[in-house]
Image: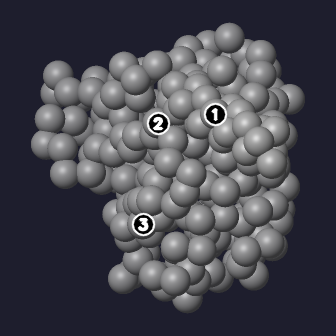
């Protein structure tokens, strides 16, 4: 009996130690700040609700949200494309962009993991997509993480899993990574974002997935699935 009791104490100590060590890993969430995303549909509101649900879901991690919405000191604080120079890297009237502000705030936190959350539009697909940065040092690890996250979301909802794509394949706008000269997502560019692991999720389509995305239950379900799979991936990686 005594040995069993001591064994349980030891296991509890190890578990607690892991939780403490795991909490040293900084996770940054970047919900979309776009509000110009269709009639009676704010991508910013939807994505923020998903991120808040994820943060509130156990296990509690050392996690933060970066968001420019309502910030009058930046340009394109509530709209703009992640693949446009004008909306990201450009300085306009002496102001940085909302995206640049978010990435500056994220980098100050020295994150290990960075997850951007967006909704798609115009696809006519009730689906979920993962994006990673082309030519990244951690491309394989990012593909695994993004793949697991979208698989978990798909399993928890009726969203079709459309797989993980490279940001260089979107063919949109004009922002390019200076290392590869390929079209890129500003938020995933290693020259902008210092996090080791960086993924962007396009969760649902603002028309095809409208009912799910506007539902409090749906947003919560997506956030919970995200957090639980992220925590499982982190545990397997044994971050310390």
Residue 65 visible (yes or no) = yes
Residue at 46% x, 40% y is: 63
Q: Secondary structure at mark 2?
A: strand
Residues tagged 1 and 3 counted as in contact (Cβ below 8 A):
no
> Residue reaching furthest bottom?
211
Q: Is 102 left, or right, of 194 in this rendering?
A: left
Q: Position of residue 237 (x, y in %)?
A: 78, 31
Query: Which of marks 3 and 1 precedes in the sequence?
Result: 1
Dot 3, crowdedness within 10 Å: few (<14), some or many (≥20)?
many
Give the answer, above or below, for where 198 lies relative to 77. above
Question: Quarter of the image holding residue 167?
Answer: top right
- The Cα atoms of the two marked residues, 1 and 2, are separated by 20 Å
Q: Secondary structure at mark 3?
A: helix
| Residue at image mark 3 | 49
Residue 13 has which mark? 1
- The Cα atoms of the two marked residues, 2 and 3, are separated by 19 Å
| Residue at image mark 2 | 62
Query: Which of marks 3 and 2 precedes in the sequence?
Result: 3
Q: Position of residue 29 (x, y in %)?
A: 48, 44
Residue 187 visible (yes or no) = no
Quarter containing the C terminus? top right
């Amino acid at each position: 009996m005594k040995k069993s009791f001591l064994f349980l104490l030891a296991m509890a100590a190890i578990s607690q130690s892991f939780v403490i060590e795991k909490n040293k890993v900084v996770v940054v969430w970047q919900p979309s700040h776009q509000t110009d995303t269709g009639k009676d549909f704010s991508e910013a509101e939807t994505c923020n609700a998903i991120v808040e649900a994820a943060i509130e879901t156990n296990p509690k991690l050392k996690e933060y949200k970066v968001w420019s919405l309502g910030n009058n000191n930046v340009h394109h604080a509530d709209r703009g494309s992640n693949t446009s120079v004008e909306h990201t890297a450009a300085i306009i009237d002496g102001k940085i962009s909302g995206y640049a502000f978010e990435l500056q705030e994220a980098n100050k936190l020295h994150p290990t993991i960075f997850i951007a959350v967006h909704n798609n539009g115009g696809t006519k697909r009730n689906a979920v997509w993962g994006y990673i940065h082309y030519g990244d040092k951690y491309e394989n690890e990012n593909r695994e993480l993004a793949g697991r996250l979208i698989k978990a979301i798909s399993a928890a909802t009726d969203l079709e899993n459309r797989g993980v794509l490279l940001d260089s394949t979107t063919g949109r706008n004009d922002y390019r990574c200076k290392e590869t000269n390929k079209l890129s997502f500003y938020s995933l560019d290693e020259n902008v974002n210092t996090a080791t692991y960086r993924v962007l999720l396009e969760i649902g389509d603002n028309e095809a997935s409208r009912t799910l995305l506007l539902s409090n239950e749906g947003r919560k379900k997506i956030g919970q699935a995200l957090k639980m799979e992220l925590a499982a991936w982190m545990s397997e990686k044994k971050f310390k």
